[in-house]
Amino acid sequence: MVEGHQCHRVAAAHRKLLVGKSFQARSPNGRFKEGAAAINAKPLMRIEVHGKNLFYFFGGGDIPQNQQQQQPLQPEVVGTPVAAVAAAAAAAATTAATPDAPRRPSRAAAAAAAAAGEPAPAAASAAKGKGKGKRGLAAKEGAEEAAAVAAAVAEEEGGGDVVVMHVHFGMSGAFRTMELPGLPPTDTTRLELLHKGAGLVAHLSAMTVAHGGPAFYVTKAAALGQDPLREDADKEVLWAKVQKSKKPIGLVLMDQTLIAGVGNIYRAEILYKARVHPEAPAASISREQFDRIWWPISAGAIMGARAQP
């Protein structure tokens, strides 16, 4: 499995080689045909990494300053989209339902509906006349929140012209750049990016390659946990969830909704260095043990990200 630090290495190389360029895009095996057409001739403006997930932003405004130089470690988080991600993540922990105030849909879910051109769940309920009193008010507020998140993200990224490509390599994917003429694509090559002027071509093979608008990114990123290689990583958020978890700590470290990027190999090394048994209940872990776990996660991942491909 391609782990988080390896994805950060890919992003660092691509910020240096690909960001700021427009490409002829095609899908050699036909499995990303619509996505290739959507990003064809659009400049690559930005790359974000959340654990084992990469997000490539095509089109939009100016290139963010942090994308104009190689930053293999803890890429700076800029702009409204990240703020929207934080808001969506916070909203995802919806309040418990009561007879007068039912559970409201998260901003992330509503933003996804907005990106797909569909009514938000709460808005749909209100449109059908099922919401009255406080329920109707909750539905209205949920729809307004969803619209605000989607609008803020789209505005920050340059309007509806932005296309975000999501990549998850899976067990053995790769996103290789080569000097022309390069190697021919294979049966697993979902995307080819060609730039004759720069004399380079890139081939992408991955388990997951999908595309959408800025709200698509908000939804995906909000569903992921803390990434130790991001500057916005907050170990206190993870600590709070560890204290409430009923899972063994070994499974917690593999849960990408709690901590993004750790795979089985790093999990074993982390727990060995921290002297914590993988089957120990997460809620039984002391703060001292947690700190011993967190430090190898960030330090070990950073060392892996610095390693040469």
Image (cartoon, grey):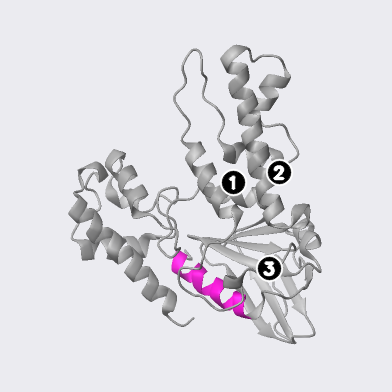
What's the CA distance linking mark 3 and mark 2?
A: 20 Å
Whether residue 57 appears in magenta in the rendering, the answer is no
Residue 75 position, x and y percent, is 50, 68
Q: Residues within 10 Å of mark 3 (few under 14, many from 20)?
A: many
In this view of the protein, which residue sits in the foreground, 74 or 250? 74
Q: Residue at x 40, y 60 (%)?
A: 263
What's the CA distance linking mark 3 and mark 1?
A: 20 Å
Residue numbers of the magenta segment: 4-16
Q: Are marks 3 and 1 in contact (CB under 8 Å)?
A: no
Q: Residue at x 61, y 66 (%)?
A: 47
Quadrant of residue 288 within the rendered picture: bottom left
In this view of the protein, which residue sits in the foreground, 248 or 130? 130
Quadrant of residue 162 within the rendered picture: bottom right
Residue 225 position, x and y percent, is 44, 51
What residue is shown with label 2?
Answer: 115
Amino acid type assigned to the residue bearing label 2 in the image: Ala
What residue is shown with label 3?
Answer: 45
Amino acid type assigned to the residue bearing label 3 in the image: Met
Sequence order check: which comes first, mark 3 or mark 2? 3
What's the CA distance linking mark 2 and mark 1?
A: 10 Å
Q: Residue at x 76, y 77 (%)?
A: 194
Residue 219, disc:
1
Amino acid type assigned to the residue bearing label 1 in the image: Thr
Asked which secondary structure carries label 3, the reply is strand
Residue 296 position, x and y percent, is 29, 66
User: Can residue 214 be spotted in the picture?
Assistant: yes
Sequence order check: which comes first, mark 3 or mark 1? 3
Sequence order check: which comes first, mark 2 or mark 1? 2
Quadrant of residue 235 within the rendered picture: bottom left
Q: Are marks 2 and 1 in contact (CB under 8 Å)?
A: yes
